[in-house]
Image (cartoon, rainbow, N blue to C red):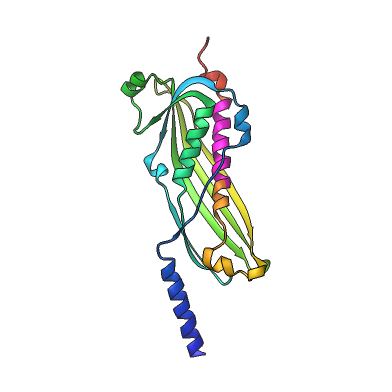
Amino acid sequence: MKKIALFTLLVLFVVGCANGRGMKVIIKPTLDRRLKEVQPIPLHVGLFIEPSLRHFSQEEWQTDMIAGIHHYVFPIGEPLTKNIEEMINIVFNKVTILNKLPNQEIIEKTGLDAILMVQLKASKLELIVEESVWRAIGKHYLSVHVSFLDKNLNKIFEDELAVEGKNLDLIDYQTEGGWWKTAGPKYGPAVEDSIEKLVFKLAQRLIAFREKITPPR
């Protein structure tokens, strides 16, 4: 029994070391198809996404009898930023990406009509393995703080947008979970789901203010 226990500890140690750097989770969200029907708002908007959000990465560990030991790295910031930029370019007819907080000088120099600022509020991942039915459930709670300002830096609106992404991953019965122990359950789609929902929710919020922010003809 002592030899078995020692061998188990050794295996766990080796697996833990193998996952020490963390497995980078592939995240490739897509834009909601309904955005293709949007008529661009005739405004020149400056988009400022907080640098900490642009480069945000989240690490998670999971230890489970079926899934094994896994160290995941979720590069959330980059795909979220990319999708927000793609969405903004659809909603407005001209967009300038800002690398720093805008001031009156920058606004006048670039000819902006409005500024959208986005900050990360919270990101929480739940990695669940239900051993009785051999399936994994990934949940991602994502929220951002959004400020939309006019060219005089007056608030058009300020809000916190929150969503929950979810994905179900069934175990491969033919290998009795063998691939799960090496590659781990697929939790990336849960993050993709939250990003897609959040970006579309932000688009809806902006479009709802169309009449207030569109300049008179």
Q: Does residue 193 appear in this view?
A: yes
Task: State whether the magenta stretch is mostly helix, strand or loop.
Answer: helix
What residue is drawn where x is 57% and y is 37%? Answer: 31
103 falls in the magenta region: no
Who is closer to the viewer here, 143 or 174? 174
Q: Quadrant of residue 199?
A: top right
Q: Does residue 67 appear in this view?
A: no
Who is closer to the viewer here, 65 or 121? 65
Who is closer to the viewer here, 174 or 117? 174
Query: Which residue appears farthest toward the left when viewing the image?
Result: 105
Q: Position of residue 24 (x, y in %)?
A: 46, 56
Residue 12 is left or right of residue 51, and the answer is right
Q: Position of residue 43 (x, y in %)?
A: 48, 20
Q: Which segment did they paint magenta?
A: 193-207
204 falls in the magenta region: yes
Query: Which residue appears farthest toward the top when viewing the image?
Result: 217
Q: Position of residue 69 (x, y in %)?
A: 50, 68
Asked if residue 187 is positioned above or below residue 144 in the image, the reply reads: below
Who is closer to the viewer here, 85 or 129? 85
Q: Position of residue 127 (x, y in %)?
A: 55, 59
Asked if residue 45 is positioned above or below residue 121 in the image, the reply reads: above
Asked if residue 3 is positioned above or below residue 114 in the image, the reply reads: below
